Amino acid sequence: MSNVLAPWRSPLSRALHRNRSQPFSRYLQLATITPEGYPANRTVVFRGFTPQGNKLKIITDVRSEKFQQLHHCPWGEICWYFSQTREQFRLFGSIQVIDAHSPDATGQQWRLETWQSLSEAARLQLAWPTPKAPREPNPEAFRPPPPSPEMPLPTFCLLCLSPQRVEHLELRGEPQNRWLFWLDEENLWQQQGVNP
Amino acid sequence: MSNVLAPWRSPLSRALHRNRSQPFSRYLQLATITPEGYPANRTVVFRGFTPQGNKLKIITDVRSEKFQQLHHCPWGEICWYFSQTREQFRLFGSIQVIDAHSPDATGQQWRLETWQSLSEAARLQLAWPTPKAPREPNPEAFRPPPPSPEMPLPTFCLLCLSPQRVEHLELRGEPQNRWLFWLDEENLWQQQGVNP
C-alpha cells in the first residue's frame, strides 16, 4: 500500500501551492529526541517526496546533532505551519537515515538524486567547517572549492520521514477544522474529523 | 541570578520588534516527549515573558496532549523562526505547568494575569468541546457563553518555559552566524560564537 498516495498528500500539496509565494513555506520544524531523552527542535527545508512511499525528504550533515540523535532514536515529528493560509500539518513517523555508508540501494539512489538537485550554495554548506564548533575566524574556510554537483560529499546525509500519523488543522474555519489521518494495522490510511 | 535579563533576551526582543508586522512572528514550535517516548511538535503562541526569570509564557488546555506529555516529561525545546529577518532561536528548558490546582502562589498570579490579558476569542476556545474528540456536529457547541474575563476557566493552563540553553542562528550573515548561550553550574549565562 505504500505506493498509494496517502489521503493527507492532497491537502498538503494544496497548502504548498497556495503558499508558494513565500519561500519559507518550505521550511518546517523537526522534533527529535536527544540520547539523554530530551526534546530537540529545529527548522529544516522540505526537499520533496521520495519517488515512492509518501516519505518527506530532508537533508542534513553527518556532523550535526540531529544525525546523532536519529541514530539513537529514529523517530521525528514535523510541525509545518503555513502562514498565508493559516493551517498546520503535524507529521509523525520513523526517519530513515541515509549517509554514504547506508547499504540500501534505493536509499543511495535517492541520496544521489537529492544531492544533484541542490543549489551550489546548499552543497557548499556541507563543505564548511564543523557545525557548532567554536567559530572559525578565517572567512576563507567558508569559501571552499565548490563540491562536485555529481558526487555527494561524505558529510551529506538524506533523511526520509515516513508518516504514520498526520494531523491537519485549519485555523481559518468557523470555528476551525481539524482532521486526523493514521495508518491502521493493515497499513491502510484512515481519517477522521475531530474537534479543533 | 534569575532576575537578571539573560543575554539572549536582547537579540530575541530585536527579532520580535523587526518582525512585528507579521502577526505569525509570535507563533513558535514547541517540541515535547510523549509518555511512550516519542517526539511531539506543534505551533503555539508566545504570550510574553514572566515578570521575573526570563521564562516564556505559553497557554494550553488541560485536555490537550501536551498537558499530559508535560506531566510525564517536563522538558521542551522551542524552535522559533523569524521569516522577515531570517533568523532562528532554539530555546531548551524545563516547563512549569500551572493549572487551577497548582499550589504555587506566584504561578497562580501569572496564570490569572495571563487569562485576563487574553482576547475573548482565545478565552472562548477553552470552553469549546474536548480537543481531538470526534468532531462535534452541532456548531452551537463552539459558541458557548463568553467566559468571565476575570476568572480563568478550569481548562486554562499556563506553561512557563525556563531556558537553560539557547541557540541563535542568523541566516543572513556571510556566511551565517550562530551563537550559543547556556547556564553554567553557578547559574550564570555564558555565550560563545560557533560555526553555523
Image: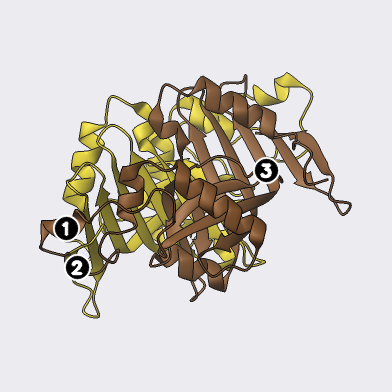
Chain colours: A yellow, B brown
Neighbor class of circle 1 (other Cα within 10 Å; few <14, some 14-19, many 20+) is some
* Residue that mark 3 sits on: B166
Q: Residues within 10 Å of mark 2 (few under 14, many from 20)?
A: some
Chain of residue at mark 3: B
> Which disc is residue A7 wearing?
1
Badge 2 marks a residue whose secondary structure is: strand
Q: Are marks 3 and 2 in contact (CB under 8 Å)?
A: no
Q: Are marks 1 and 2 in contact (CB under 8 Å)?
A: yes
The location of residue B121, given as percent across then percent down, is: 30, 44
Quarter residue A161 falls in: bottom left
What residue is shown at x 77% (from left), y 22% (from top)?
Answer: A138
Q: Are marks 3 and 1 on the same chain?
A: no
Marks 3/1: CA distance? Answer: 38 Å
Question: x, y (%) of residue A182?
Answer: 25, 68
Q: Is residue A27 above or below residue A72?
A: above
Q: Is residue B162 left or right of residue A96?
A: right
Q: Residue at x 30, y 63 (%)?
A: B131
Query: For the residue marked with disc 3, what is the amino acid?
Result: Val
Three-letter code, disc 1: Pro
The residue identified by callout 2 is A189
Q: Nearer the viewer, mark 3 or mark 1?
A: 3
Identify the residue at the far left of this view.
Answer: B138
Q: Residue furthest bottom?
A: A185
B17 relative to A177 in the view: left or right: right
Q: Secondary structure at mark 1?
A: loop
The image quarter containing residue B48 is top right
Count of marks placed on residues: 3
| Residue A21, image quadrant | top left
Name the residue located 56 percent from the left edge and 26 percent from the top edge: B15
